[in-house]
Every structure is written in structure tokens, then in C-alpha cells.
Image (cartoon, helix red, strand yellow):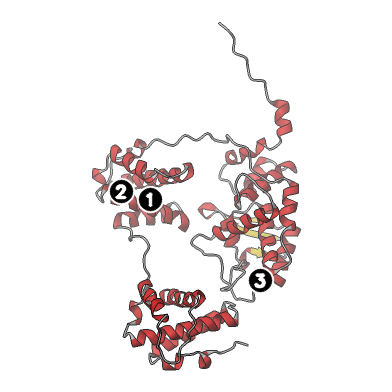
Amino acid sequence: MRVHYSRQVLGLSAIHSRIFRNLFGEYERRLFRTGYNPRVARLYLHSIAHFGVWIEREHRRLKTIDEETLEVFERHRSTCTCPGTSRNHTREALSGVRRFLQHLRERGVVPIVEARPQPVGLVKGFLQWMQVHRGVVASTLTSYGSYVGDLVRFLGDDPRTYTARGLRDFVAQRCRHYRRNSSRMVLAAVRMFLRYLAVEGTCRPGLEHALTPLANWSQSSLPRGLTPEEIRRVLVTCPSTPRGVRDRAVLLLLIRLGLRAGDVSKLRFSALCFETATIRVSGKGGREVRLPLPQDVGDALLEYLRAGRPRVHSEFVFLRSVAPFTPFAMRQAGKGVGHIARAVLKRAGVHPPTRGAHVFRHTAACQMLRQGVGLEGIAAVLRHRSVVTTGIYAKVDLELLGQVAQPWPEVVRC
């Protein structure tokens, strides 16, 4: 049964705006629907009502509210004289008002403040082309739009004036503080943009060759998987609490099936089939495969659904462990799973070369290879486009490599 706090919220009866009161009631229902603790919800509602009283006394219109308005309201609270309102001056109280402002933005009541300038028509056309003809996912489009938008602002919106020197100057400036992988992403985005312009006939063909690729030695390193003992330590550290049950299910999906962090965070109930013990996963480029669901992974998922998952209606399997009980942020969904992986590795005292969810993907591949699975089978599970990408795991068995490795030839003197 949902508890109603509207009649007991301090200051709510002093608000005359019917629109604000309706939005207040809607947000109250959202707080309980997403699993907020009643005490926290009540604190938020008191602060929001105080905010509503204040904006009426200040004669501020609802659609003009922004971050600056909240700063003024925060200063007001120290000398508040609003009748019948909450006098709570804690940071949590103001946090409730900020969350309410975000709710108003999602509802379209308050304009969304863009962190970056909107892309010009040239960039919009490129992003639409990438989405329709190349099947690029939203996260990659966001990164490409950022890099290409900076390029257009740097060189101008007339591609006929682009030169090799100008492109190199832009890359040198943009990648000045980047690491290798980020710099490669910038180069890939700029080259693809130049190819698109050439197809559209607005830029001379071949200009992308003016940007030389960064040095990269393929398969120069060893796979960075965990040992069986480290895997055991990682799984043992997950407690029997709701959060621990969730983390264990997430880790088993990463370790046994080699899923990417984004695959786990975006997993929907429609992708699970316990009758046939399979799971459907969509990889890069929209490729969809159905993988077998191991017994321990299925048991962990059922335990999470039974005792760990909040009773909140959502099509996504995994939710946040604290209110609001919502799915991980969809724009950068993999970050939530990455945070789980780093926290568990730290708690277990395991120190792999990279502390993120991807180390478990390497672990899954190494396990399959040691169990006799061929590279083609590993490539199918990991959803690699080419078995060449999977070839790095052929170097896992160091003892066998030591037997077949040839000694380095001595230099013959002239």
C-alpha cells in the first residue's frame, strides 16, 4: 500500500499554483514507485514544497527555473521567513529540490540545459548517415559527434576549404593530452567524417590519408585474465545481501559468458529463457546471438530475482541497489557494471593489469581455451567479427609456447 504524505507536507497548502501542485503529486508518486525510503521521500517533499512557496513569493515562473535559481534558493534558506515551511538546511534537502528539477526537465516543463553546443547541419547529416548505413550504437555516435563537432568549429563548416595541414593541426591539438586509445578514436571519427564528405561530394576524396595512424603492434601483449584462485576469491567476497546477490549474478555473466559491461547493464527479461537455458545478447553493429546459460549463472540470476531485486516494475533485469531503483544510466550503461567490477576486485585484493569489467571477458576466453574450446568457438561466444581478433588467446598456454618457441638466432659475424 502506498503512503500519502501530501496532506502532511509543510508549506504545500500555501502553494496556489495548481500546475505546481499537480507536478508535486506526480513526483511524490514517482518517489514511492522507485523505492525511496519513506523518511528520505518525506525530507525531499518538505524541501520541494518550501521551494514552491519561495518561487511564488519571488514571482518566478516555473519554466524559467535553472541551476542559478537553486543557488539563490540555497542562500535564501539561511534567512528564510516563508510561513509554515521546513527549516531543514541539510545538503540532502537541497538534493531533493535538484532531483525535482531534473524531473521537471524530463517532463518538458523546464528546458534541458545542453552541456555542449548542438551539432551543426553538417554534423547532423554525418551522424544520421552513421546510424542508418553503419549501424553505429548511440554511445559511439555521441563520441563521434563530439569529435567531429570540434573539427567543424576548428576548420569551419565549408569542407572545400579543408587541408591536410589543418586536419593535422586539429588532431595535434585535440589529442594533446589523450592516451593512445582515445587518440585512435579521434582519428577514426575524423577519417569516417572525411569519407562521408567525399561520398556527398563536398570534400575531395582521399583527404583522410593525410592523417597517419598511430603506432600499434597487434597482439603484442598477453591476455589479462584472472586465475581460478582469483576468480574464487572474487566470488566469495559477494555477501548474501541484496547488493551482494546482484553483484554475484553480474560477475558470473561476465566470467562465464564473457559479456561486455554494456551487455549486462542492458539485459532485459525478454532476452532470458530459463526453459531452454539460453540468453539472447545483442553485440556491436546490432548482431544478435543466443548463448547457452550455464547452471551456476542461471541459479545466480534466479536468486537475484527472488531475494535481491527490488520490487519495481522494469523491463531491465539489473537495477540500482539504492533508491531510485532504476536501470543503470542508458547513455553510458557500462559504467555501472564497471563500478561493480572494480569494487569487487578491490575487496578481494585482486590486482589485475586493468581494474574493470573487461578483465572478466579475458578470463572467460582463457577458461574456454584451457577447456579445449577452439578459437572459432571462442570467437562465436565473444561475438568477434574475425577469428583473428580471438587469436591473442592462443598465447595463454605459456608452457606449450615454451616448448614450440625457437631460440633467437645469433648474429653471424662478417
Most foreground residue, 263 or 57: 57
Query: Dot 2, crowdedness within 10 Å: few (<14), some or many (≥20)?
Result: few
Instruction: Inspect this view and state whether residue 23 appears.
Output: no
- Quadrant of the rendering where the N terminus is positioned: bottom right
Residue under numbered circle 1: 147
Residue under numbered circle 3: 309
Query: Dot 3, crowdedness within 10 Å: few (<14), some or many (≥20)?
Result: many
Residue at 59% x, 10% y: name it. 412
Residue under numbered circle 2: 200
Q: Mark 3 falls on what kind of element?
A: loop
Instruction: Inspect this view and state whether residue 234 appears.
Output: yes
Q: Position of residue 134 (x, y in %)?
A: 44, 51
Q: Which mark is residue 267?
A: none
Q: Mark 1 falls on what kind of element?
A: helix
Report the amino acid beneath label 3.
Arg
Residue 35 position by quadrant: bottom right
Instruction: Say which label, 3 or 2, has the lower sequence index.
Output: 2
Q: Give the CA distance from mark 3 to mark 2.
A: 50 Å
Q: Are marks 3 and 2 in contact (CB under 8 Å)?
A: no
Q: Position of residue 336 (x, y in %)?
A: 57, 61
Q: Position of residue 352 (x, y in %)?
A: 64, 46
